[in-house]
Image (cartoon, rainbow, N blue to C red):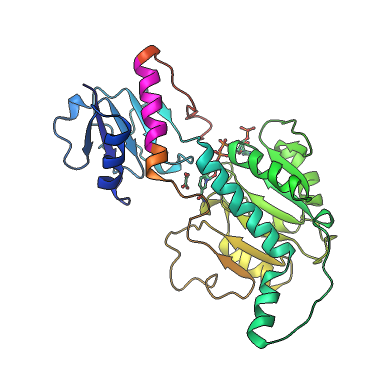
Amino acid sequence: MSSFLFVTPTWDAKLWAAEMRKARPGLDVRVWPEMGDAATIDYVAAWLPPPNVVKSLTKLKVIFSLGAGVDAILTDPTLPPDVPIVRVNDPDLTHRMSEWVVLHCLWHHRQQRRLDQQQREGVWDSFATHAASAMTVGVMGLGVMGQDSAKKLATMGFKVVGWSRTQKDLPGVTCYAGAAGLDAFLGQTDILVSLLPATTETDGILNRALFRKLSRKGPFGAPILLNAGRGRQQVEEDIVAALDAGELHAATLDVFRKEPLPKESPLWKHPKVTITPHAAADSEPSVICAYVAEQIADYEKDGTLRNLVDRRRGY
Ligand code: NDP
Ligand code: OXD
């Protein structure tokens, strides 16, 4: 019988363990810190593991990230270097993210904040609106999440451009890649959506200098920012300053440098900011456990693992 350990100090690991037992009956599922003999554990699923815990599992075969993002695992400096890391790539998570992206693009495009204000004030003003095709949405990160969002945004009628590390070819999406393609991508973008992973290269990429390169030809005269990638990508003081200076029209932020977002952050009460609490794409325990169970079954059959993390790239 194989053994499996959850190491999730900030999540409800007992709930996850119950789902894992349902997904793979017969698996010996344990929850850190009550892990028994560390040398008997074959698999670990982790989110923000404390240092030396994963390292202590001397017979470990696979590390599973409980999220699509792996920064919460790679921050452990004591991680054993040779154990493969598998991340989540599941349609349920992807579709949830696309819902968030499409919702917030439409929310800004259809000026819902203004309509809510009008309702509060009892004002009937059917102001002129514009077609989705008047806006270009620029998706940073054309991986699993970015590609699905880009496709759905194009279906809604938005013009869509995308940017990634390596060149992509996607129907209906003009694709740019790398440092050489960044300015051309930004220059067309009226709504910037970040679905990038947190890496040393993407740290702080959403800053004021970048915002100044975005298009000002859209219907609102200034660009809109959406970030559901990771908070480390955004310079929060720059977002506030750019909004106050009219260099950004509005922002929807799901991720923050510090989570939960501290009470004193000016983002909470900023009139041009919409906040969601790292909930763009919720990890549904039953779905993620079924995905992990399937990977274990394939691995135990013939050694196959899918959606492996490239540690050097950082995602
Ligand atoms: P993928 O690994 O499939 O895609 C990442 C994309 O980012 C790839 O297209 C990659 O380019 C691109 N990229 C990485 N580094 C750079 C760079 N330096 N310059 C340009 N492009 C770059 O990840 P997913 O789509 O599955 O997920 C993306 C991120 O979304 C996760 O890492 C996580 O941080 C976040 N996330 C947030 C959630 C939330 O609820 N807020 C939920 C789930 C995920 P290339 O294809 O060329 O390698
Ligand atoms: C993820 C997340 O990476 O929930 O899956 O942020």
- The answer to if 296 sits in the magenta stretch is yes
**Could you tell me if residue 172 is visible in this image?**
yes
Residue that lies at the very extreme toward the left in this rendered image = 36
**Could you tell me if residue 75 is visible in this image?**
no
Residue nearest the viewer, comparing 267 with 114: 114
Residue at 65% over, 45% down = 149
Question: Whole-percent x and y of residue 311?
Answer: 47, 30
User: For the N terminus, which image quadrant?
Assistant: top left
The magenta-colored residue range is: 289-300
Question: Whole-percent x and y of residue 268?
Answer: 52, 72
Question: Whole-percent x and y of residue 207?
Answer: 64, 57
Task: Please tell me whether residue 254 is drawn above or below residue 306 in the rendered image.
Answer: below
Q: Is residue 120 left or right of residue 21?
A: right
Residue nearest the viewer, comparing 136 with 186: 136
Residue 62 quadrant = top left
Question: Whole-percent x and y of residue 59?
Answer: 24, 22
